[in-house]
Image (cartoon, grey):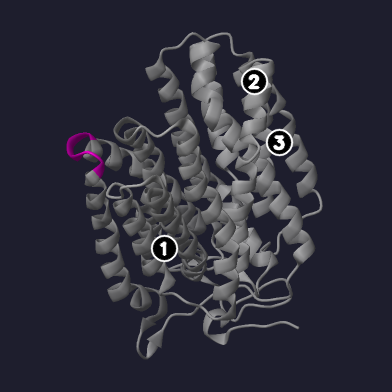
Amino acid sequence: MKRADDSDRSGSTGDCGGLAAPPSVNRRGVALISAAHVVDDIYQGAVPAILPFLVAERHYTYAAVSGLTLAATVLSSVAQPAFGWWTDRKPRRWLIPLGMLTAAVGIALSGLTSSYALTWLVIAVSGLGIAAFHPSAARAARQASGNSTRAMSVFALGGNAGFALGSLLTTPILIVAGLRGTVLLVVPAVLMAVLLVVRLSHVLDGRPGRPRNRSMPTGVDNWSAFGRLTAVVVVRSVLFFGISSFIALYFIHRLGASTAVGGAALTTFLVAGAMGTLLGGWMADRYSRLASVRTGFALTVPGVAGLVLSPGLEVAFVFVVITGIALYLPFGVFVVLGQDYLPNRIGTASGVTVGLAVSVGGLFSPLLGWLADQTSLRVSLAVLVVLPLVALLLTRGLHDPAAGRPQRVT
């Protein structure tokens, strides 16, 4: 039986519904929740930046460091669908600032703990804060975005920017202050949490007596389509982790580049990905969401193949840019499609597409590493060329519930 929350879905549409008025894009709402996404994901990006300092100051082994990475990422991603299910029962917008603060406090304490067990625990708590933030934030972003995938892509881009900013902020702070400097990282979360408490409801819901029209999807949950979409997200995640994990090493060991150039290749890939995220949102609104997804995977095939076959650095960088743009074209689209396929389970859909499916893809990285050890990095990357084709086959049975919906910006 269909369940809908009138406070969240008035004036909305879905597979079986209609629109009372064209859905609007709340620019201030998108900007605020996207900025919150930037700040929240700083604490995801801070973890890999902290690890070298833990090794240097506390002499942790690589196995111990891997355990901390597991606590920060996999636990968080697995917990996200649970938080999504909880917010589906009753919207809990307060989880947005609380989850962010929890993530920040966990990272802040990681430099103050005296034992590995406590360090593991506080980093796991930080991961749970990340998990609590995302489903509710994705719901708020959808309310502000209406049916605009381009607006939701801005929200998705905020997470990418936050992850990168986490490393840029953490490393210089810890160089100057040592591990105990992690306590300073709590400042952005405190400031943003205060802003959210004061402004978020007003920006999203409007003034008393002048409420904003809320455009949320309605209709019947399509679990079959959502399952197929989840499989596509997993395939894309395997591609992402495989390329991001080995691209710098490939430039160094295969193409003879320096360590700095290898790092630049990874940075180029991520920057191109940011461009691809925004371009994918524009394409989804201009043509269709599935057109954006399919174009991305279709372009990933020559992108990865060209990278593997590149004779030198200059050509390789060109294909890095192509691959980054192509692989990120569907990134923001996945969240919106998942929400449309499960209109009565917005939180669950967001938790799976943003969290669980992404982490499952990351579990394949050790297998790719084993293959590279047994053969070569070139062979390991060449295997990835097959995956976009698999993703394209999986999208054949999908449809776009939002086809033909108009967008209006306010």
Is residue 240 visible in the rendered image? The answer is yes
**Which of the two residues, 25 or 1, is positioned nearer the viewer here?**
1
Q: Is residue 160 left or right of residue 58?
A: right
Residue 68, percent from left and from top:
46, 44
- Disc 1/disc 3 C-alpha distance (Å): 31 Å
Callout 2, which amino acid? Ala
Q: Is residue 138 left or right of residue 381?
A: left
Residue 130, percent from left and from top:
45, 58
Quarter of the image with the N terminus is bottom right
Is residue 288 positioned above or below 346 on the image?
Answer: above
Q: Residue furthest bottom?
A: 209
Is residue 53 positioned above or below 190 on the image?
Answer: above
Question: Which label is found at residue 30?
Answer: 1
**Which of the two residues, 209 or 86, is positioned nearer the viewer here?**
86
Question: How packed is label 2: few (under 14 Cα within 10 Å), some, or many (20 or more)?
Answer: some
Q: Are marks 2 and 3 in contact (CB under 8 Å)?
A: no
Callout 3, which amino acid? Pro
Under tag 3, what secondary structure? helix
- Mark 2 / mark 3, whichever is N-terminal: 2
Under tag 2, what secondary structure? helix
- The residue under label 2 is 372
Q: Residue furthest left?
A: 176
Question: Which label is found at residue 388?
Answer: 3
Label 1 vs label 2, nearer the camera:
2
